[in-house]
Image (cartoon, rainbow, N blue to C red):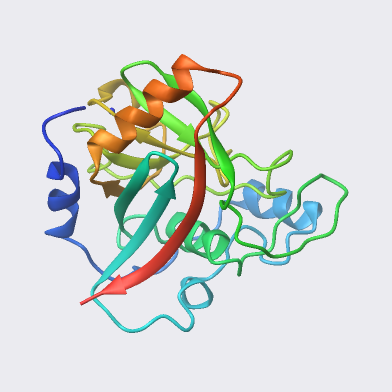
Amino acid sequence: MRTPPRSGPGIALAALCACASGPRPFPPPVPEVLAHNQTAGDPHAGRFTYDEAVAGLPEGTRLLAILATDAGEIRCTLEPGEAPIAVANFVGLARGLRPFQDAPDGPWHTAPYYDGTLVHRVQDGEFIQAGRRGSGPGFVLQDEMSAGHVFDRPGLLALANSGRPHTSAAEFFISIVPLTQLKGKHTIIGACDSEDVVRELARRALADATNPPKIETVTIRRDP
């Protein structure tokens, strides 16, 4: 997998906050992705809805994900106006609403997916990656990329994949620097501040691979 740029704390967050918006309609399904998820038994066929993901949240104009880690807190502004399927999926998993599997033949169940997961991969000076649980969530998502989807600054929150189209699901990464080589290869779902925390997580993961840092909780909320 690959990664994005650096300028200063909060710049990426401010850039997305300026254009934060509500969800746009889901794009038409990709037939092979739909078929794969139906065969896997995903009750939502890879299209968990945005309304289900945010059910019960107070109204607000900005959708935030607060990542509490053992190195500090990371605040991310999510962009359902750019990637509605991916954002709905991320939010639903974080809130324990979107069903998933821990193993390919296991039951579909719900729980706060990201709580207790590790920062399991770091590309030194480029990105941190987290969100792995078991053998994967049991589904895949179709890619959501546009001309504006460029890794031109640090702090971008995007979905990891296997290097092939339409293979993202739950794992995510946060860029430390601009990663222009990733343009058109990963769905970007938001932008994060707390660059110092991201860099500290990277430092700890590289310093001791046997004791990687942890995502303690992911909290979703709306702000006015």
Q: Nearer the viewer, residue 158 or 95?
A: 95
Q: Is residue 3 visible?
A: no
Left or right placement of residue 112 versus residue 104 in this view? left
> Where's residue 114, x and y in %?
56, 51
Q: Quadrant of the C terminus?
A: bottom left
Residue at image location 62% in from the left, 47% down from the top:
140
Q: Is residue 74 above or below residue 160?
A: below
Q: Is residue 54 above or below residue 71?
A: below
Residue at image location 61% in from the left, 39% down from the top:
132
> Where's residue 165, x and y in %?
53, 34
Q: Is residue 119 above or below residue 75?
A: above
Residue at image location 52% in from the left, 39% down from the top:
214
Q: Nearer the viewer, residue 80 or 206?
A: 206
Q: Nearer the viewer, residue 202 or 33?
A: 202
> Where's residue 162, x and y in %?
58, 28
Left or right placement of residue 105 versus residue 174 in this view? right
> Where's residue 211, x and y in %?
57, 25
Q: Is residue 96 visible?
A: yes
Q: Nearer the viewer, residue 213 or 99?
A: 213
